[in-house]
Image (cartoon, grey):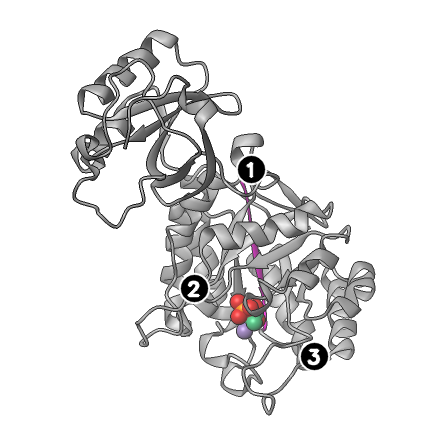
Amino acid sequence: MSAPPAEGLEQSARLIGVRHQWAYLYAMGPVKSCGGPWREPEAAGFAGFPHINFERKIFMVVVMKPGTEQGEIDRLVDQLQNLGLIVSVTNGVGCSILGLVGDTAAVDMGKITTNENVERVMRVQEPYKKANRKFHPADTVVQVGGAKVGGGNFSVIAGPCSVESKEQIIQVARDVKASGAALLRGGAFKPRTSPYSFQGMGLDGLKLLEEARAATGLPIVTEIMTPKYCDIFEEKVDLVQVGARNMQNFDLLKEVGKMSKPVLLKRGLSNSYEEWIMSAEYIMSEGNQNVILCERGIRTFETYTRNTLDVSAVPAIKRMSHLPVIIDPSHSGGYYWLVEPLALAAVAAGADGLIIEVHNDPANAKCDGQQSLTPERFQALMDKLRPLVELMDKTLVEPD
Ligand code: PEP
Ligand code: MN
């Protein structure tokens, strides 16, 4: 590599993408540090990485808190330069960003993070905008019928995995309402792994859900599997669920984004937070801002439970996005005895609600009986939940 250039980093480089703790910067010309001495990449600690093409500088990115005084920024830049790093100060949206090149192994990331003027140490800009908390600091509150989710409102959605009969859905609706559920769930269209399994009652099931709503006043939540039913769901359903298996069905997401009804977007079985938020972004970019995210357990190496509840999703997603986050402890654990502990963990982690499978006769349920609570067990869970929701400074939304 040759001598330092005359121009600054901002003019000579273009940020092409960022991942994890690193930003990858493609240097279109030679790069210099701002203010500090020029260091050859080898001297800056890259000598041990012969596979690195030095035309592609690896950068760590420090995002400063908005309003940080220049003197504080300069102090941090000095500290970092004293560690042998090349530091470039650039202005992002509303805040200053430090791009670092050098032997980052020598950098104590914890030390940078604990600087009270540092917002975070990571990528420059996320690929999502509408769902991004940076551009919308306040929590979004999603209104579903008379119920609210988010911004301190904790709502419980309960009901059977599938609608099976009029008696079943109305009875379960009455029971869960009596225990404090604010919304009724019930699958009419079921995404089953096997084509030979019960596929749901379809449009007849939707009619029964409407009857259960009429009988109890509970808003209804049910899964949409194809864009062809968007009009029907728009008319009949209060909260439109996009299931885990359709989280990246982008055509469906776009159509649901044109609806006026709020959407419950479940996390895909093996999807990252960013992919999940990007799916919400698909919906929001079409105009529908009322998205609730639902963590429902992810696939891991563990087979003892149906899935693994990723409880970190709650605080992490809330940090990334302003959208409400709820937990589905039923599909996470896959067993009725796991539902209560996982539900309580969800409340403690700061979730904005729960969606729980409740069946009046789990042993004979057509779908997911093993993970369904009886109405009695659901009542016991709600009794434990109430004080915990209060402890978390949230209000349990009671049914109308
Ligand atoms: C469901 O809620 O019944 C369901 C099928 O959930 P998931 O998409 O999370 O598997
Ligand atoms: Mn189910």
**What residue did someone put label 2 on?**
297
Residue 345, position as x, y percentages in the image = 37, 54
Q: How many marks?
A: 3
Marks 2/1: CA distance?
Answer: 23 Å
Foreground disc of the pair 3, 2: 2
**What residue did someone put label 1 on?**
151
Please tell me which residue lies in front, 267 or 128. Answer: 128
Q: Which residues are magenta?
A: 153-160
Does residue 351 appear anywhere in the picture? yes
**What residue did someone put label 3 on?**
167
Kind of residue indicated by mark 1: Gly
Label at residue 291: none
Q: Residue at x 18, y 24 (%)?
A: 83
Foreground disc of the pair 3, 1: 1
Residue 253, position as x, y percentages in the image = 67, 58
Principal secondary structure, stretch drawn in magenta: strand
Left or right of residue 304: residue 362: right
